[in-house]
Amino acid sequence: MSIVSEALRDREFGVAPLETLKSMSGLEFLQALIDRRLPAPPITRTLGFLLTEVAEGRALFRGQPTFEHYNPIGSVHGGWAATLLDSCMGCAVQSTLPQGSGYTTLEFKINLVRGMTDKTGPVEAEGTIVQSGRRVGVAEGRITDGEGRLLAFGTTTCLIFPL
């Protein structure tokens, strides 16, 4: 069993009510997810990754690619890396938002540098803010393996709006 699977085993999964989201800054909301004061998003169970650290302008996810993430040609589907990058970069933007604000991804671009398999082991995906304004947030992200090798990287542009 992977480290992430173990961490997800006894978690509650769900979606926080909009009123809860509106009542917190982005950083407070993300920290509440980490502290288990709010349920983990269902996608974390489906794809086997979890938000583990957050600070203003930074979000760190940990995950482990498994056989369940394979495509038909015998490697981890690029969509797994794309979703992990979308998550860490989007949460980096969210961590900068004031109470009552939300965001959505407008676009993202990724580069897959190294393939992943179920032998890759645990990976980290770190998103960091490039620029966060009143209407647009831009972030970048990197996925690295346990030895610090770059597996994928990307950038995102997010629309920021009042909830």
Image: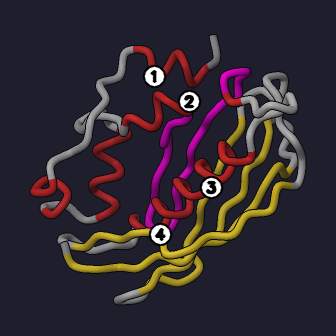
Viewer-nearest of discs 1 and 2: 2
Q: Secondary structure at mark 1?
A: helix
Which comes sooner in the sequence, label 3 or label 2? 2
Res 105 label: 4
Name the disc covering residue 8, or none: 1
Mark 1: which amino acid?
A: Leu
43 on left or right of 143: left
The mark found on residue 47 in the picture is none
Q: Residue furthest left?
A: 19
- Determine crowd level at label 4: few under 14, some 14-19, many 20+ residues with C-alpha closer than 10 A: some
Judged from the image, the secondary structure of the residue bearing numbered disc 3 is helix
Place of residue 38 in the rendered image (x, y in percent of width and height, measured from the top left): 24, 38
Amino acid at circle 3:
Leu
Mark 1 vs mark 2: which is more N-terminal? 1
Residues at circles 1 and 2 in contact by the CB criterion of under 8 Å: yes
Range of residues picked out in magenta = 49-68
Nearer to the camera, 136 or 67:
67
Q: Secondary structure at mark 2?
A: loop
Mark 4–mark 1 distance (CA, rounded to whole Å):
25 Å
Rendered image: mark on residue 85: 3
SS label for mark 4: strand
Colouring rule applied to residues: secondary structure
Query: Mark 2 — residue?
Result: 48
**Which residue: 37% across, 88% down?**
135
Q: CA distance from mark 3 to mark 1?
A: 19 Å
Residue 133, position as x, y percentages in the image: 41, 88
